[in-house]
Image: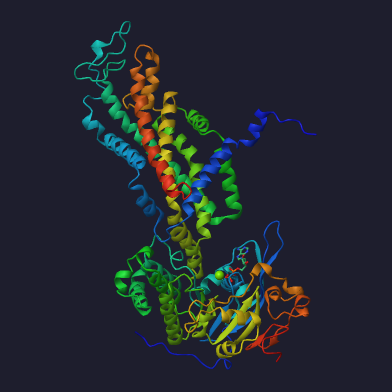
């Protein structure tokens, strides 16, 4: 197997590979008010970098990634902003230009490995399909490469597995197969939307280790989407915490974990199960739910659930305090103002 | 002030129209196919695991298999040639127009002195041919229309579906009757075509419904995320996963096709050639002797009922196996 060259470099010196600027996605449901699922999100991903996008369910993580990929439904939503990838704004590419990019330059893996595979065709066919599509290979040429790929993602007996149907594989093996499909054409960016959420804990760790190994070996940039800060801890160079469609805090992995500033980040950190916690001690998730959110235009959406709330929180939108590497959006941050 | 509503009228208001009921039934089947509680296992496979022990399904399947085998080997097992008239001497137009059972002819003969059992056995063949071809053509037409509508969407979808809904709102036998009577001379093929036409909108709406459900499925999204082309999405990812409900419907449609074919044939819109006996045709010819020899009508009618029952039992249990609401 060829040795892939490592093209990692220090994060700030290179131009971003993907630069998302003020991304907004609004859903218009009939007879209902417009709903801002993503409300002005900006972040950069540099070549070879791993960026985390963390937040509770419903905060707009999947919608963000689908918008970047051009995979949102054709009707019922508007997408504004920019997602510049390698000089082109993905959001203004034509559908067919975007189709040529997907799978070749940017790929994605999803939460549920079982339902993300086509039940009626073999694993081998699903892997070769991508290579035939983007690399102009014949099926015959692609088959040995597919076996090689399966081997690479740690699927034992890859030649035999090519002939298997998805239901014949275990959950972890299916997610490995999906990773193989996503990496088949060596994309420069991989977006992983909760890739371990549907898996057992032990399998989760294996898949995370595999992803880490692959991005290090191939130099693929990774956007890691998860609701679990524990998942990003060992993986990400930079972490963005999303709340109600806006980024509320950003930081390098060490800074963010050592000294979180936004009360929501603190809440998320407290909800990570700890091995050293006394048995029976309850996790401390953030009380309340996203249903309590205030609109961002006139308040901090998190205010109703916030233990650090001050008067101004319900009257004004907090500004971004920081730059594109670290920062937060809070009137009364933990640890006092900068 | 509110007048008490005439109960008859109220009943009428609440009861969905014929077309609406048919559309609802088709949509329910399309939905049933889309709900996938054992993802990764193909629907047909999942259904089979549940059906293996279902006595209703097994009864229907047994009847169906017997009928199909009989239809295939009919000419070799029929004791008499269907055009031979061994009982011609027994026919007494004034006193005894239909010869009764006798040695060598367990069911007796018909009004031309032909062996009734042989004609019944061979008749299964025409019935099967008409049923299978009518359903097959209906299925092909419906699959083409449904795929076009489901894959292209937009204005094409609206147009195709408008036409389909209009066709569904016309009582099906009436529509088949109208089409069949347009033909200059009735034959087996006019029968097949007119019954195929009433099946087309059913399959079209069904397939389009399950394709739409597939369009928003996870594995189609995953394939799109890898840049797979539209044509491959439709033919490799959507269509093969939408076909389960279509197969169920084909089984049910076979029953309807056999009954409708018999009805049209009975009304003289089928194959008039008596050298090719067919149950509906035999039923039609039996009318003249219904008081003297009712058995002449009973036998073909009984065959039609049993065979249609077989397909219906099989189709309905397939439908139930597919539908999570009725599944047990
Ligand atoms: N197609 C859609 N139509 C309307 N609302 C949607 C659609 N997709 C997602 N949403 C809404 O957008 C919000 C964000 O969803 P999502 O990005 O899936 O959350 P998550 O962070 O859990 O991935 C949710 O409130 C969801 O209800
Ligand atoms: Mg999500």
Residue B228 in view, yes or no = no
x, y percent for residue A149: 37, 77
x, y percent for residue A311: 78, 79
**At 60% from the left edge and 48% from the top edge, which residue is drawn?**
B159
x, y percent for residue B226: 48, 71
Q: In the depicted view, which residue is nearer to us: A333 or A31?
A: A333
Relative to A331, residue B268 above or below: above
Answer left or right for A87 relative to B105.
right
Q: Quadrant of residue B54?
A: top left
Relative to B276, residue B69 above or below: below
Answer left or right for B296 relative to B146.
left
Q: Quadrant of residue A72?
A: bottom right
Q: In the depicted view, which residue is nearer to us: A334 or A46?
A: A334
How many marks overall? 0
**At 40% from the left edge and 37% from the top edge, which residue is drawn?**
B312
Answer left or right for B91 relative to B231.
left
Q: In the depicted view, which residue is nearer to us: B100 or B150?
A: B100
């Amino acid at each position: 197997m060829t040795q892939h060259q490592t093209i990692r470099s220090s994060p700030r010196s290179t131009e971003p590979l993907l630069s998302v600027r003020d991304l907004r996605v609004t859903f218009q449901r009939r007879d209902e008010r417009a709903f801002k699922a993503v409300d002005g999100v900006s972040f950069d991903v540099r070549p070879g970098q791993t960026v985390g996008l963390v937040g509770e369910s419903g905060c707009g993580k999947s919608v963000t990634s689908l918008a970047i990929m051009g995979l949102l439904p054709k009707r019922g939503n508007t997408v504004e902003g920019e997602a510049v990838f390698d000089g082109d704004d993905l959001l203004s590419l034509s559908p067919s230009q975007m189709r040529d990019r997907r799978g070749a330059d940017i790929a994605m893996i999803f939460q549920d490995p079982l339902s993300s595979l086509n039940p009626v065709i073999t694993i081998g066919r699903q892997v070769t399909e991508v290579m035939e599509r983007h690399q102009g290979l014949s099926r015959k040429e692609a088959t040995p490469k597919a076996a090689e790929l399966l081997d690479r993602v740690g699927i034992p007996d890859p030649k035999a597995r090519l002939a298997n149907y998805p239901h014949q594989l275990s959950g972890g093996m299916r997610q490995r197969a999906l990773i193989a499909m996503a990496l088949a054409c060596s994309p420069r960016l991989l977006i992983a939307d909760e890739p371990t959420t549907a898996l057992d804990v032990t399998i989760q760790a294996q898949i995370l280790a595999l992803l880490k190994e692959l991005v290090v070996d191939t130099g693929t940039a990774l956007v890691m989407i998860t609701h679990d800060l524990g998942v990003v801890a060992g993986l990400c160079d930079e972490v963005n915490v999303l709340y109600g469609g806006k980024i509320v805090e950003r930081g390098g992995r060490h800074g963010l974990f050592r000294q979180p500033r936004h009360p929501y980040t603190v809440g998320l950190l407290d909800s990570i199960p700890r091995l050293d916690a006394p048995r029976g001690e309850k996790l401390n998730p953030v009380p309340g739910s996203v249903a309590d959110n205030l609109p961002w235009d006139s308040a901090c959406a998190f205010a109703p659930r916030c233990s650090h709330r001050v008067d101004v929180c319900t009257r004004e939108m907090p500004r971004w305090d920081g730059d594109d590497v670290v920062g937060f959006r809070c009137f009364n941050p933990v640890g006092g103002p900068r | 002030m509110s007048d008490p509503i005439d109960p008859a009228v109220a009943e009428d208001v609440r009861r969905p129209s014929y077309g609406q009921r048919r559309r609802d039934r088709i949509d329910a089947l399309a939905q049933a196919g889309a709900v996938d509680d054992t993802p990764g296992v193909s629907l047909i496979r999942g259904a089979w695991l549940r059906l293996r022990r279902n006595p209703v399904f097994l009864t229907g399947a047994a009847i169906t298999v017997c009928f199909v085998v009989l239809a295939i080997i009919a000419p070799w097992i029929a004791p008499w040639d269907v055009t031979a008239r061994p009982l011609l001497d027994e026919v007494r137009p004034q006193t005894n127009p239909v010869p009764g059972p006798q040695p060598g002819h367990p069911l007796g003969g018909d009004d031309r002195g032909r062996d009734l059992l042989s004609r019944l056995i061979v008749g299964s063949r025409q019935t099967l041919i008409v049923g299978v071809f009518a359903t097959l053509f209906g299925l092909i037409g419906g699959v083409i229309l449904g795929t076009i509508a489901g894959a292209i969407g937009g204005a094409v979808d609206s147009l195709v579906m408008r036409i389909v809904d209009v066709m569904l709102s016309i009582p099906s036998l009436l529509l088949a009757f109208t089409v069949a009577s347009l033909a200059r001379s009735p034959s087996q093929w006019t029968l097949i075509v007119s019954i195929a036409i009433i099946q087309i909108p059913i399959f079209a709406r069904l397939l389009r419904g399950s394709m739409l459900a597939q369009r928003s499925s996870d594995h189609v999204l995953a394939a799109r995320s890898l840049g797979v082309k539209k044509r491959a999405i439709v033919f490799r990812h959507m269509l093969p996963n939408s076909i389960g409900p279509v197969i169920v419907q084909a089984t049910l449609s076979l029953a309807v096709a056999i009954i409708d074919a018999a009805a049209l044939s009975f009304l003289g819109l089928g194959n008039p050639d008596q050298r090719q006996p067919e149950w509906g045709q035999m039923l039609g010819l039996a009318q003249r002797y219904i008081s003297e020899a009712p058995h002449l009508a009973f036998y073909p009618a009984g065959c039609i009922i049993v065979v249609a029952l077989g397909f219906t039992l099989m189709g309905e249990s397939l439908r139930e196996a597919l539908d999570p609401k009725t599944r047990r």
